[in-house]
Image (cartoon, rainbow, N blue to C red):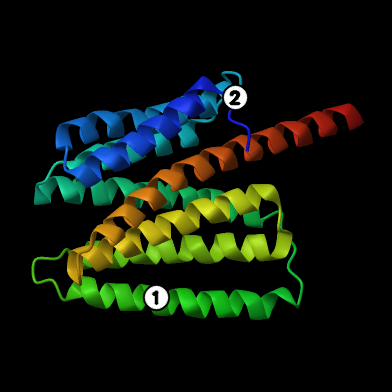
Amino acid sequence: MKIKSPTLILYWLSSISFVTFFMLGWDYLALLAKSCVVPSIGMYYLNSRNGKFSFLPISIFLLCYIGDVAVLIDQEDFFIYSAYAFLIVYSLMLIYAVKDLKHVTFKRRDIPVILVVTGSLIYVVISVLEMQFSNPKGQNFLYLIYALVLTVLSILVFAGYTAKGSLQYLSFGLATTCFILSDIFYSIKSFYVYSDLLQLLTLAMQMLSYFFLAKYFIMREAEEARQLQKKLSVE
């Protein structure tokens, strides 16, 4: 991967700085670094599209920014705001997953793989929900909706990648996987057992998810532009 864009360099620097400061307990510096992460990857997306962008990706990055900042404020009310922000993010990503599936043709050999992935994912989600439901102060209904949306999103994305296997789907799949792992690690460290390793993995997966999501948006919109240009040339 060649890093040529200054905004992408800023993204990786701010991501590494945030993870380092957070793990060291330097909360103020961590908050400053975290406030640069999503804006820098958002600017990378805009620069890659030469100023041409869609409303949904910008909305998703804005919601990620709100969720990121809210979760750093160590109060229960702000954590709920963060959960709602990311719930909307996953719902908007679900719109993309449904649209992408319209251009995918499934083969018979794809079905066993999709069923195995779906079963494994459902098992993991149920296990994580059991940990969260054990918390007497937990927002069980919110957790349930959150897990349902993320599970459906993951199944659709993995099904599409299994059938098509394009770089665009790979980026979407990696972004979704990173979101899932980040939430799983967060749940384990919050409701089962805390460890610095789980904290580090949670932060690392979250930072990687934004990068792969931006790559997905860039490739998807570039492909749409190519298809439109091809259609106009035929006409």
Q: Is residue 131 visible?
A: yes
Q: Residue at x 55, y 26 (%)?
A: 53
Query: Where residue 41 sits in the image (x, y, percent)?
Result: 46, 31
Kind of residue indicated by mark 2: Lys
Query: Where residue 130 sits in the image (x, y, percent)?
Result: 25, 78
Task: Give the residue number, with chain letter if any, for mark 2.
Answer: 4
Q: Residue at x 63, y 52 (%)?
A: 169
Query: Where residue 78 sits in the image (x, y, percent)?
Result: 15, 45
Near mark 1 (Cα within 10 A), the count class, few <14, some 14-19 or many ≥20, is: few
Task: Give the residue number, with chain letter if any, for mark 1.
Answer: 124
Q: Indicate whether 195 appears above or below 123.
A: above
Kind of residue indicated by mark 1: Val
Label count reads 2
Q: Within the image, what quadrant is residue 11 found in?
A: top left
Q: Residue at x 51, y 21 (%)?
A: 6
Choose between 3 and 131: the one closer to the eye.
3
Q: Which quadrant of the figure contains the N terminus? A: top right
Choose between 212 and 99: the one closer to the eye.
212
Say whether residue 156 is left or right of residue 226. left
Outermost residue toward the top in this view: 51
Lower sequence index among marks 1 and 2: 2
Say whether residue 222 is left or right of residue 138. right
Near mark 2 (Cα within 10 A), the count class, few <14, some 14-19 or many ≥20, is: few
Do the CB atoms of the residues marked 1 and 2 lie less than 8 Å apart?
no
Q: Within the image, what quadrant is residue 165 found in?
A: bottom right
Choose between 53 and 43: the one closer to the eye.
43
Element class at badge 2: loop
Q: Nearer the viewer, mark 1 or mark 2?
A: 2
Mark pair 1, 2: CA separation:
38 Å
Query: What is the number of the mark on residue 79?
Result: none
Q: Within the image, what quadrant is residue 33 found in?
A: top left
